[in-house]
Amino acid sequence: MGRVSGKIALVTGGGSGLGAADCELLAQEGATVVVTDVRIETAEAVAQRIGSGAIAIALDVASEQSWIAVIAEIDRRFGRLDILVNNAGVVLVADVEQTTLEQFRWVNAIMSEGVFLGCQHAIPLMNKGGGGSIINMSSTGALLGYPIYLAYSAAKGAVRSMTKSVAVMCQVKGYKIRCNSVHPGAIETPMVQEAEGRIGIEEQVAEGVLPPDAKGHPRDVANMVLYLASDESRFVTGAEFVVDNGLTIRPF
Ligand code: NAD
């Protein structure tokens, strides 16, 4: 019996990095996973790797029409949704003096509005099935002052506080829906490779406890997502889970 057996999960940005690792681990633990991505070919590749426990659907998280279509498709196929991982994201390396309004809006349309739309459109289907767990991918960018990630940090800060608002609303209204945020530090994915100007050049992530300057493996975040997706975390809502190997608490 897997830790999320029988549950239906939707992961956004599931075609790469952290989202792909979430899809693989949730499926391994018994969930049926709807792998979504704006780049459908990447979602299809992940779903194919997983096999019968996954399907791929195109979803642009910044488009409300796209959300309506995907939620309707999940309703039609499964009649329920138990897990939503709002993971899709983009990175923009620019400080407050360099960021244009257009860039700011682009980043926030995907990572702030996308999370808002995900929560809003998933809640009715989760309620239909008796409840669920929403996991919003924030970042240590929501907790620290990174000069070069202005728009990114603004979006992740919005995700952090939106999560708490959704969590309390669900409790107040008697919905059996929990909502938590995850705050990874640097994890070795294509996004970090892009931000560091080494596209496609992967670093090896060692096993065991890692030194302070090391990057984590996508599986390190997926393990947290799995816990929050499972009923093991039933007494946990509105909380923020930092997965950063101590980055945010080091005084030096
Ligand atoms: P990634 O670039 O490997 O994957 C991001 C995925 O999101 C891609 O598959 C991309 O196609 C998809 N995407 C982009 N725009 C989209 C849209 N409009 N609609 C749907 N999908 C879209 O990046 P990653 O590192 O795996 O990041 C995943 C999430 O984790 C992001 O929200 C990111 O901000 C967050 N995060 C990552 C790190 C890290 O170190 N990698 C740290 C903190 C937070």
Image (spheres, rainbow, N blue to C red):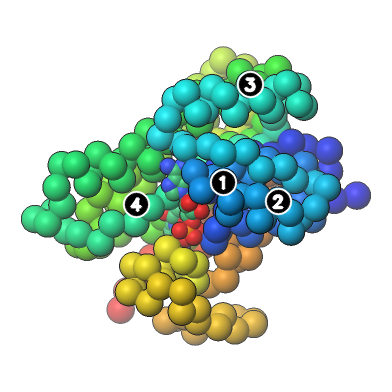
Q: Quadrant of residue 235?
A: top right
Question: Where does the image place residue 216, in percent across and percent down from the top left?
Answer: 53, 72
Q: Amino acid at mark 2?
A: Ala
The nearer-to-camera label among 2 and 4 is: 2
Q: Amino acid at mark 3?
A: Ala
Which numbered dot is residue 142? 4
| Distance of label 2 from label 4 (alpha carbons) | 31 Å
Q: Is mark 1 within 8 Å of ligand 1?
A: no
Please give the residue where the numbered disc 1 appears in the rendered image: 40
> Which quadrant would residue 17 be assigned to in this image?
bottom right
Q: Amino acid at mark 4?
A: Ala
**At 69% from the left edge and 28% from the top edge, which residue is drawn?**
74
Q: CA distance from mark 2 to mark 1?
A: 10 Å
Depth check: give the residue in front, 132 or 21.
21
Work out whether 133 lies above or below 221: above
Q: Nearer the viewer, mark 4 or mark 3?
A: 3
Identify the residue at image location x=37%, y=68%.
194
In whole angstroms, how far apart are the C-alphas of marks 1 and 3?
Answer: 18 Å
Percent x, y for residue 224? Answer: 62, 56
Mark 2, residue position: 47
The numbered disc on residue 72 is: 3
Q: Dot 1: what SS?
A: helix
The outermost residue toward the front is: 41
Asked which secondary structure carries label 2, the reply is helix
Considering only order in the chain, which callout, 1 or 2, is on the residue closer to the N terminus?
A: 1
